[in-house]
Image (tube, helix red, strand yellow):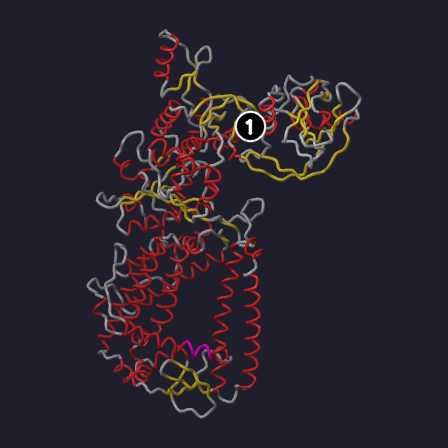
Amino acid sequence: MLDKNFNPESFEKSFSFEIEASLRKPNAEPFMVLLPPPNVTGSLHMGHALCYTLQDIIARYKRLMGYDVVFQPGLDHAGIVTQLLVEKSLYEGGAEKGSLTRETLLKEIWFFKENSGNTILNQIKTLGISCDFSRLRFTMDEDSRKAVTKMFVKLFENGLLHRRKKMINWDPLIGSAISDLEIVEKEVDSYLWYIKYRLADSSESITVATTRPETLFGDVAVAVNPSDQRYLHLVGREVMVPLVNRKVPIIADSHADPEKGSGAVKVTPAHDFNDYDIGVRHKLPILEIMNLRGELNENVPELFQKMDRFVARRKVVELLEKKELLEKVETIKQKIPFGDRSNVPIEPMITYQWFVDAEKLAVSAVKAVENGKIKFIPKHWENLYFEWLNNVRPWCVSRQIWWGHRIPAWYGPDGQIFVAESLEEATVKAGQFYGKNVVELVQDEDVLDTWFSSGMWPFVTLGWPRQTSDLGRFYSKMIIVTGFDIIFFWIARMIMMGLFCMDEVPFCEVYIHGLIRDEKGQKMSKSKGNVINPLDLCKKYGVDSVRWTLASTTSPGRDIKMNEHSVENGRNFLTKLWNVVRFAKMNGCLYNHDFKVEDVSYPMAKWIVYKIKQMVSQVGSAMAEYRFDEVTHHLYHCLWDSFCDWYMEFIKPIFQQSSLKNDEKRGYDLPHTLLKKDIRDTTSWAIVQFVRVLYPIAPFISKKLSGEMGVMEISWPIIGEIDAAEAIEEVEFLKSAISSVRSMKQYLHIPPTEKVSVRLESDSYDVADLIVKYGEAMHRMVGINFGKITEQTVPVVLNRAVIYMELGSKIDMGKERVRLSQDMKKLLQNKENMLFRLANEDFLNNAPEETIWDHQKRVEEIEDKIQKIDYVLRSLEVV
């Protein structure tokens, strides 16, 4: 017997899905789900929980549908993040900064990975994610190392990867280049300094506005807009750079905006992306005045050398003021790029780096989505994908850290580069180049961007560069589920690298889910104190409750507002299911493996078979479109409305034999023992079909309850045809009668439990017989007694019948009409207001999607109330 109370903790740990996940079906259609590999430093957060739950639902559903499913797990080495974390730990433990060697640090990081790096994998298992952990991969395992090395060489040999000196984003704290996607723009309080640059041949000056006065030591020109009449007479002349008195030209360039600042800008090609472009256009020299630590170098006056850039800024401003070269200062808001890991301002620097020619790779990646080989769900995310790829720049893939895939490039004594898969191969190439056998080579110190190896994940996990059977079977037959924030980082790069390496798209579908926010719609962050830990929710409400909530709140194009109340509602739903099964078992229900739906004879049983069949079809259609919210919607209403509110209430008298009247037993047209067996078998069958469909979303309770009903293996329901038209008509009439009486009692403020006498009038013998047959159930469900009526009545008009409800003397019909008319007027006004807002283009274009959706839902609710009150008012007019 099931426990009286639903306690998920009592059974969740007794189920493991690893054996199920590893079973292959070699003759079935292949399907792969690729888990975005979490960082080795990671701990499960709500974003993980959402993404992994949706993937698991898909994987479980596909298994039930007979596919040969591979659900591939893995871990990402997360180069910068992991190195920073371990370095911090070592420094806090007493190690001196700068004392760590490459060998020592890598040894410590591998130790961390082996001892702490699998934490998130255990948390993933806790969430019930059915990955095949026997296939677990790590982005720096030996097979990955070989694959990454081969890919680097392949790109290089095809002219798609090269090393050159170019301006990049430099993170002074990490001491490495980072890509455009690894910076975060933040709006900060700043200043605009107006500095006088004196002309070299007169006492005049031109005022230059800048937010970075410390870089004036690297100025090589002053630029004005060619259409700016104020400065045209100065173009071609020279000015003196303040504090260093170096002559630089005044040039005309369209980058200078007459409407911003003074209209004149300083040009520092070595330390600004826009200035670098100006320098290229005008063939200006490049003067680097900063080192890789963010300190000013030997190309500035001695006073400023080795001075931190921000300290130097204050000192420069101070000297300019003393020399009366600072005209004024404005307080402004400025967007500044910060490193997303270090949280320090990025410094544009010109350094030697390795670049992948992403522009060429992007051509086929764009076509793959345009021609429908890859489908984004929802489709509008394609626009963001196209926007980025159509404007993509060379991808800087080298990083100046130690944790990662070391670049397979070696340098000869003269700096000649030899790219190869091994030192031995590089040595052979060097020998051929220099014409001698022994050449001393030095390997590149840099490592590859983490996303380089992650971009190869779809084919590396299937065995590439070996031509494995899995590679031929599963590559391109997979789905990716992820958030929109890594469309650039991961999705686009997987497509580009997959097409280049395999000449085929890596996957066919990309499902983009929304972001998890708090109940107010704000992004979760530790600083705001609104972070929700999914593991805490699992412990408090059960894993299935969390999974149900995540699925039920996932709708295409919408972020998710997460709160404990939603998870509590999920638990309440599963508690309802638990109690249904408990009630069924208490009444002798156990799954009959010989049960056939076509043998069902009792109308209510036929009706529930029809509703279950309908639900299975609806859920299948919703799953095919990845409408997880609709899946839970159909499951919820099938259980709560059809099964519990109607079917269970109608069959309770059958189980409670002593409460059945003799005429009611006769009305069922079956001997009571046979009727009871019919109901038991149908009830058991319906419960088992329900938990089978629920299984992808809530696997723990589904396994538990399926076993309780006598079914050990879960499979997708296949339900035969049943002739239920007459039964459906009969039950729907009863539902209509009961609902109409309930509405009448509700809007006339008659308590639901108060018994009222009713009289039935109908020309149809079938209707009258139906009311008699189910009279006991109707009495229990809506509190009506069929009998003699002496007081005033109100008619409840049905199809082919009228039920007259006795109201007694307590109800004042006139007052009720007035009250309900006033309620109707308010509802109509509210509806008009809502529709007015929904017709407003400004509202539709600017309001959050959640707000628009809430308005639409509210209109539906108001219309339902209007319809019910209108029905009651029309009934009162008859009185």
Q: Secondary structure at mark 1?
A: strand
The residue under label 1 is 170
Quarter placement of the N terminus: bottom left
Q: Is residue 241 rendered to the left or right of residue 491?
A: right
Viewer-nearest residue: 56 or 148? 148
Q: Locate residue 210: give its quadrant.
A: top right
Q: Give the residue type at disc 1.
A: Trp
Q: For residue 840: magenta?
A: no
User: Where 494 sits versus 430, above or below?
Assistant: below
Q: For residue 743: magenta?
A: yes
- Start and end of the magenta stretch? 739-744
What is the total number of numbered labels drawn onto the structure image? Answer: 1
Viewer-nearest residue: 624 or 426? 624
Toward the top, the furthest residue is 436
User: Where 418 sits versus 590, above or below?
Assistant: above
Residue 211 image point, x, y percent = 68, 32
Residue 111 image point, x, y percent = 42, 30
